Amino acid sequence: MGIQNLEIQNKCLLTKWLFKLLNEDGLWQELLRNKYNKNKTLGSCQKKTMDSHFWKSFMNVKDYFLGLGHFNVKDGIQTRFWVDTWLGNKPLKDRFPALFNIVRRKQDSIATVLSSPNLNFSFRRNLIGQNLANWERIVASLQ
């Protein structure tokens, strides 16, 4: 019948706008960054009740969008250590779910984690057994 799925079309359009927000500079990008991002990464932004309808729509598709690609780490400020895909082909939270469940700050950026020589991490319990082995795998891959 030629009827298009508007939900899919809207999701595609919003992800295209998010891509432009992350990768291009312009007046509307600067306006949104100053109003909603400030000094935060896109991944750490959360939907708030007072946000515009447009920004709330961005936040509804943000996790889907961020899961579509890989990140160039650069200085590590914009890339989340556990949640974003930057080391391998899946996020660390999916590769090491047991470690992700016991880490205290799940949204920390790579820059925050690497800011101290001993890695800036805090787990809710001591690492033993498989969790310790997995943590050692992550540390070895960082080196």
Image (cartoon, grey):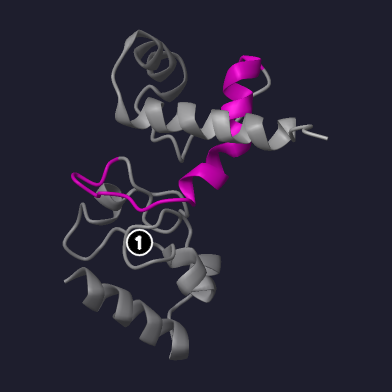
Asked if one can make out residue 117 in the rendered structure from this viewpoint, the answer is yes
Magenta run includes residue 110? no
Residue 124 seen from this side? no
* Picture layout, residue 71 above or below residue 46: below
Q: For the residue labelled by badge 1, is the local secondary structure a helix, a strand or a loop?
A: loop
- In percent of width and height, residue 61 lies at 59, 37
- Which is nearer the eye, 124 or 74? 74
Residue 6 horizontal side relative to residue 131, left or right:
right
Hey, which residue is sitting farthest front in the picture? 1
Give the percent coordinates (x, y) of residue 10. 64, 29
Residue annotated with mark 1: 121
Residue occupying the point 39% across, 35% down: 41
Quadrant in which the N terminus appears: top right
Tell whether 129 sits left or right of 120.
right
Q: Residue furthest right?
A: 1
Asked whether 34 or 133 is in front, the reply is 34
In magenta stretch: residue 74: yes
Residue placed most toward the observer, 73 or 126: 73
Q: State whether residue 96 is above or below residue 63.
A: below
Q: Which residues are magenta?
A: 50-77
Residue at 24%, 74% (x, y): give it: 141
Q: Position of residue 56 (x, y in %)?
A: 63, 25
